[in-house]
Image: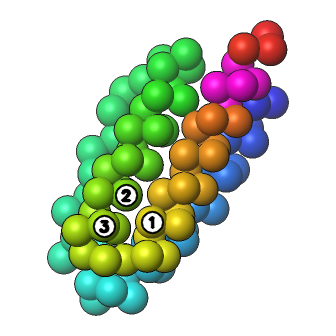
Amino acid sequence: MALDATYSSLSDLQDKIAELLVSYYGSLESFKLLPIPSCTVEELPTCIHEFAEKLRMIAQKDKLHDLNNISDEVTQVGSKLKYLLRLK
């Protein structure tokens, strides 16, 4: 259940990120996509937090305040998953 909710949330955020990047950079091809590491279920919250931090760094470098807000949403997804995994 926790992974389903995480996947759904990340899928929605993926769309937001893509739309935002296209609006700023013209296409996704002009933006270097961040590699997605392989993670175990236990490592997934950390991987999500690391991805959010990379987004935040890009947002701050290019002064993209709305991307910074999305990075906060990604962090929340990772934090919620971390909490839910502790309940099992």
How far, Cα to Cα, is label 3 from label 1?
Answer: 7 Å
Q: Residues within 10 Å of mark 1 (few under 14, many from 20)?
A: some
Placement of the C terminus among the 4 image quadrants: top right
- Name the element at disc 3: helix
Q: Position of residue 54 (x, y in %)?
A: 32, 50
Residue that numbered label 1 is attached to: 68
**Mark found first going from the N terminus, 1 or 2:** 2
Whether residue 14 can be seen here = no
**Coloring applied to the structure:** rainbow
- Name the element at disc 2: helix
* Amino acid type indicated by mark 3: Gln
Q: Main secondary structure of the magenta part?
A: helix
Q: Could you say which is closer to the camera, residue 5 or residue 81?
A: 81
Is residue 56 depicted above or below 38 in this figure? Answer: below
Placement of the N terminus among the 4 image quadrants: top right
* Magenta region includes residue 67: no
- Write the residue at 28% across / 89% down: 26
> Residue 54, which numbered label?
none
**Which of the 4 image quarters holds residue 22?**
bottom left
- Write the residue at 25% across / 75% down: 62
Residue that numbered label 2 is attached to: 56
Q: Position of residue 73 (x, y in %)?
A: 60, 56
**Which of the 4 image quarters holds residue 63?**
bottom left
Could you tell me if the residues under marks 2 and 3 are in contact, i.e. CB atoms within 8 Å?
yes
